[in-house]
Image (cartoon, rainbow, N blue to C red):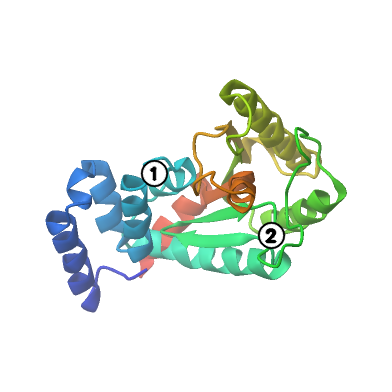
Amino acid sequence: MKKVLGTGVVFIAGIMMLLTSCDTTRNMSKSQKGAAIGAGSGAVIGGIIGNNVGNGKNTALGAIIGAAVGGVAGGVIGRNMDKQAEAIKDEIPGAEVTRVGEGINVTFNENNPDGSKAGVYFATNMSDINANSKLALDKLVKVFNNYPETNILVEGHTDDVGEAAYNESLSQKRAVSVGDYLKAAGIAASRLTIQWYGETQAKVENSSDANRALNRRVEFAITANDKMKEAAAKEAANN
């Protein structure tokens, strides 16, 4: 992130040119464009563009973009999120951690690139938290406790094997199981939002076993809560 000062003005101008000239971004809403310009972040732009192409459905990124405050305060939040993202990567090497604008998107797929089991995953047709998933969630809880001024969105997703209604119900049970585990481990319920989407938000085509494994996943969107936003605004005002 860059402050809207000095060379930052040129950076923002470049973003504004992108928003007015790129075919993809012409379809953005005014609020999406405002979030991109205010935050001054290529990551936000990338998230919005990614949300306008492909299947056009990525609620985790949408939640992060929607929570952005932009400007200098957004830069303060972004630096805080940089630290939290690095902490998650250090604690859970198998997690896919992506910094987006003023938030963090964390994805737990079923398998690591080497084929070993990773992070938070579930046996076929099951929604209980297994031993390996507990290990990953316990490490995530540790990070969440170290950074208490954040809101956490938990999403459940499945592949397209079976009936759509069943998959939606299964993704609900899995997302709720993760949320319940986090609450039992001491994460305040007020920080958590639980959502589920069944097979409707596939990351890749369900064209192979490997791809379906990528679509059977739990995603987290981590954003600043009101307390962090207020502190960031005060820090920005004093700079």
Q: Amino acid at mark 2?
A: Asn
Residue carrying label 2: 146
Q: Is residue 81 left or right of residue 91?
A: left
Q: Position of residue 181 (x, y in %)?
A: 78, 40
Q: Residue at x 78, y 34 (%)?
A: 126
Q: Answer whether residue 237 is visible to the viewer in this image.
A: no
Q: Residue at x 39, y 50 (%)?
A: 68
Residue carrying label 1: 66
Q: Residue at x 52, y 64 (%)?
A: 80
Q: Amino acid at mark 1?
A: Gly
10 Å neighbourhood of mark 1: few (<14), some, or many (≥20)? some
Q: Is residue 71 left or right of residue 127?
A: left
Q: Quadrant of residue 156?
A: top right
From mark 2 to mark 1, how far is it between C-alphas? 24 Å
Q: Do tag 2 and tag 1 residues touch (Cβ < 8 Å)?
A: no
**Going from the N terminus, do you reach mark 2 or mark 1 first?**
1
Image quarter (top left, top right, bottom left or bottom right) of the C terminus = bottom left
Q: Position of residue 67 (x, y in %)?
A: 42, 46
Which mark is nearer the camera, 2 or 1? Answer: 1
Q: Is residue 197 left or right of residue 134?
A: left
Image quarter (top left, top right, bottom left or bottom right) of the N terminus = bottom left
Q: Quadrant of residue 146?
A: bottom right
Q: Position of residue 95 (x, y in %)?
A: 65, 60
